[in-house]
Amino acid sequence: MKSIRVGTSRPYNIIIERGSLSRSGELISAVTKSKKAVIVTDDNVDRLYSRTLLDSLEKSGIQADVFVFPHGEQSKDLRVLGEIFDFLCEKRITRSDFLIALGGGVVGDITGFAAASFLRGIDFVQIPTTLLAQVDSSVGGKTAVDIPGGKNLVGAFKQPALVICDSDTLKTLPRPELSCGMAEVIKYGMIRDEKLFGICESHNIDSIDQVMDDIVYTCIDIKRQVVENDEFDRGERMTLNFGHTLGHAIESWHHYTDYTHGMGVAVGMCLITERFCEREITERLKKCLAAYELPVSTEAPMDELLPFCSTDKKCASGGISFIVCEKIGCAEIRKVTVGEFNRLMER
């Protein structure tokens, strides 16, 4: 077992261990005295892992109910959030009880926001079951839902009480979901760790499981460092958004249906790198992404993507921040006006 301590305003541990889902009750009991919980998950994950989690909680004397919603980004909205609140009321959840997010990034985001806002805040535990959630979205305390105006525009900072990463859950991921997570792994290599990028370059989607435990640990530790330095996303933490401004725009252009978050981030990284970096960097990035069956270009016209960028949460006072990696392992935050960003991207 590996453990990482995150020293944010509310410190917590991240457990990285194969098979840890089956002893999650024991791990959770070590951080809370509560004996009542609600598990929030989607219909895909529910069929795979809810029973294992319920059995483990029961062994530790924790009674839990399960709220299940349809999988997909389209469920991360105010309607489903309201349904979660109604379920918590029905189950008479109090401030001394807690939530468990069992699933990928969508589950973690909406469960965390529910925990941040229900009764003005109750505890929650993250049990991420996708690669993207394990290396990125379950760590750092960002929670949110989407609204018609844009992705993740309504949310809160809410640190979990505990994060449990069981790499065995990744074995049941559909191939596109594994690819989606690898986009974030490659992002970490680009912004912070040339060695990590090299590991990604030397493997592909069929061989990456050989080094998956080390990859998950490395990515989480990178995010820990960044979040501890900038918990509320006012400076260094912006580097984690490499590829995301355009990535979110591409997701929006596709109406969150046939395009995953990882696909959007992959293309977003390429679009920025093509315009601001040497050709060698762009070619290495594209080759690496292609090895994990990720796209490196988009059919979406740039003039149709840019309006989505101007409503992104990374815009402020008529300006927009975007990330450039002129050297692998080193990220730079650039701030320009929205108009200048549009001109740079349209060239």
Image: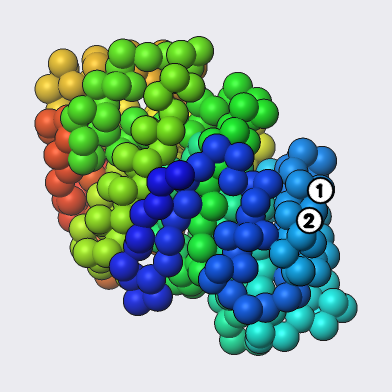
Residue under numbered circle 2: 54
Q: Secondary structure at mark 1?
A: helix
- Which of the colour schemes (rainbow, by chain, secondary structure, one colour) is used? rainbow
Residue at (54% x, 71% y) in the render: 31
Q: Are marks 2 and 1 in contact (CB under 8 Å)?
A: yes
Q: Quadrant of the N terminus?
A: top left
- For the residues labelled 2 and 1, the Cα–Cα distance comes to 5 Å
Within the image, what quadrant is residue 305 found in?
top left
Side of 123 where 306 appears, left or right: left
Q: Position of residue 91 (x, y in %)?
A: 85, 77
Q: Residue at x 77, y 38 (%)?
A: 48
Of 263 and 211, nearer the camera is 211
**Could you say which is closer to the camera, residue 141 or residue 284?**
141
Residue 100 percent across, percent down from the top left: 66, 62
Please indicate, yes or no, whether residue 337 appears anywhere in the rendered image.
Answer: no
Label 1 sits on residue: 51
